[in-house]
């Protein structure tokens, strides 16, 4: 092989290796489904089962929710009430912006600068839920999630998260004992992931939101392949849509904007976008390659070489060049 081709191939391999290494955790989210940590429906008592659960209740009976202030909008009062009504014996904590900041300032002062520095309020709403679960333990529920049955059976697991489709986990409903190592890692890693991306949606997802938590979950699991500190996973059937599910999902997120529509559009058209990506990539490579060929030809015409030494390209003899020259005249 020609030296140029070898250099080209080595560069491509190094570049691809570097790119894959960087997105490895993201790629692994596509294939890892958390099934081995699933909270199986068979181990959960039916919603109105008379069977007394013998499992110890580890998670404290606290429900955490977040909102800007105490005036919950009308469309979320229904879901909120459904959770309160089903859990009269639970403590209820609504984390308003003011209370959240006071809590961080008092209990986690090292995080206050990052917390105040977040550009989007939803990043603070994301972050505060990891801190209160780490500090108090309990169950966090998004305001757009209502309760369909008592959450008591979920108190038996030291920590649980909710699986989303097509990939990863969500942060809209999750439970934990105080100071669980997973939520310790989730709060400890927040400053490292506080980066800005091109689109606000990606910035929020990757710095504090579900994508952030999914990546932390992957790293946490790789570091704890076995052991009883594993985080259990609630699958979609146990989350909503069924009589035995724990939650009901209401109106969508309050902070979705145009870039979210763009992302959803991209997700729907991923085949088209992949083809466009590959076409552009190959077009770029081809441009570089043909520039390279033209340079060789130019050199050949200057008489530097008897014929151009171009990989994968026919050899141009001195005679061809002379013929071409004659046509041009
Ligand atoms: C609470 O926040 C909402 C949304 O920002 C706002 O419209 C409302 O006026 C606030 N209510 C109070 C009592 O501050």
Image (cartoon, helix red, strand yellow):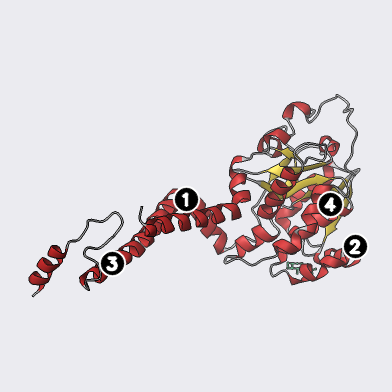
**Above or below — where is 3 with respect to 164?**
below
Give the label, 2 or 3, closer to the camera: 3
Question: Which residue bears the numbered disc 3?
Answer: 296
Disc 3 Cβ-to-ligand 1 distance below 8 Å = no
Q: Are marks 4 and 2 in contact (CB under 8 Å)?
A: no
Q: First in sequence: mark 1 or mark 3?
A: 1
Q: First in sequence: mark 4 or mark 2?
A: 2
Question: Which residue bears the numbered disc 4?
Answer: 133
Give the label, 1 or 3, closer to the camera: 3
Q: Are marks 1 and 3 in contact (CB under 8 Å)?
A: no
Q: Residue at x 71, y 59 (%)?
A: 208
Q: Residue at x 55, y 62 (%)?
A: 259
Q: CA distance from mark 1 to mark 2?
A: 44 Å
Q: Residues within 10 Å of mark 3 (few under 14, many from 20)?
A: some
Question: Which residue bears the numbered disc 1?
Answer: 270
Q: First in sequence: mark 1 or mark 2?
A: 2
Q: Are marks 2 and 3 in contact (CB under 8 Å)?
A: no
Q: First in sequence: mark 1 or mark 4?
A: 4
80 or 216: which is nearer to us?
216
Question: Which residue bears the numbered disc 2?
Answer: 107
Q: Secondary structure at mark 1?
A: helix
In the image, residue 243 lies at what x, y percent? Answer: 70, 32
Q: Residue at x 85, y 36 (%)?
A: 156
């Amino acid at each position: 092989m020609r030296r140029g081709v070898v250099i080209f191939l080595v560069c491509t391999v190094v570049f691809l290796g570097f790119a894959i290494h960087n997105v490895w955790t993201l790629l692994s989210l596509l294939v890892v489904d958390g099934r081995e940590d699933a909270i199986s429906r068979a181990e959960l008592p039916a919603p109105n089962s008379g069977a007394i659960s013998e499992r110890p209740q580890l998670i404290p009976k606290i429900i955490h929710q977040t909102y800007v202030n105490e005036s919950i909008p009308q469309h979320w009062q229904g879901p909120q009430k459904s959770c309160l009504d089903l859990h009269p014996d639970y403590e209820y904590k609504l984390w308003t912006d003011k209370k959240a900041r006071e809590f961080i300032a008092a209990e986690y002062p090292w995080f206050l600068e990052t917390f105040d520095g977040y550009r989007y309020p939803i990043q603070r709403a994301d972050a505060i839920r990891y801190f209160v679960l780490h500090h108090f333990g309990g169950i966090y529920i998004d305001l757009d999630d209502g309760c369909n049955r008592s959450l008591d059976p979920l108190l038996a697991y030291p920590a649980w998260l909710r699986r989303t489709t097509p990939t990863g986990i969500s942060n809209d409903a999750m439970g934990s004992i105080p100071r669980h190592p997973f939520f310790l890692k989730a709060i400890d890693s927040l400053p490292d992931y506080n980066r800005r991306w091109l689109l606000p949606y990606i910035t929020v997802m990757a710095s504090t939101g579900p994508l952030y938590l999914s990546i932390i979950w992957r790293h946490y699991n790789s570091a704890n392949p076995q052991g009883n500190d594993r985080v259990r996973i609630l699958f979609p059937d146990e989350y909503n849509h069924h009589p035995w599910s724990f939650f009901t999902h209401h109106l969508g997120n309050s902070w979705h904007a145009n870039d979210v529509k763009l992302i959803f559009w991209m997700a729907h058209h991923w085949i088209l976008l992949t083809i466009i990506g590959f076409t552009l990539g190959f077009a770029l490579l081809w441009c570089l390659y043909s520039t390279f060929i033209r340079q060789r030809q130019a050199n050949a015409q200057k008489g530097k070489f008897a014929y151009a030494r171009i990989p994968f390209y026919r050899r141009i003899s001195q005679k061809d060049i002379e013929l071409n020259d004659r046509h041009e005249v």
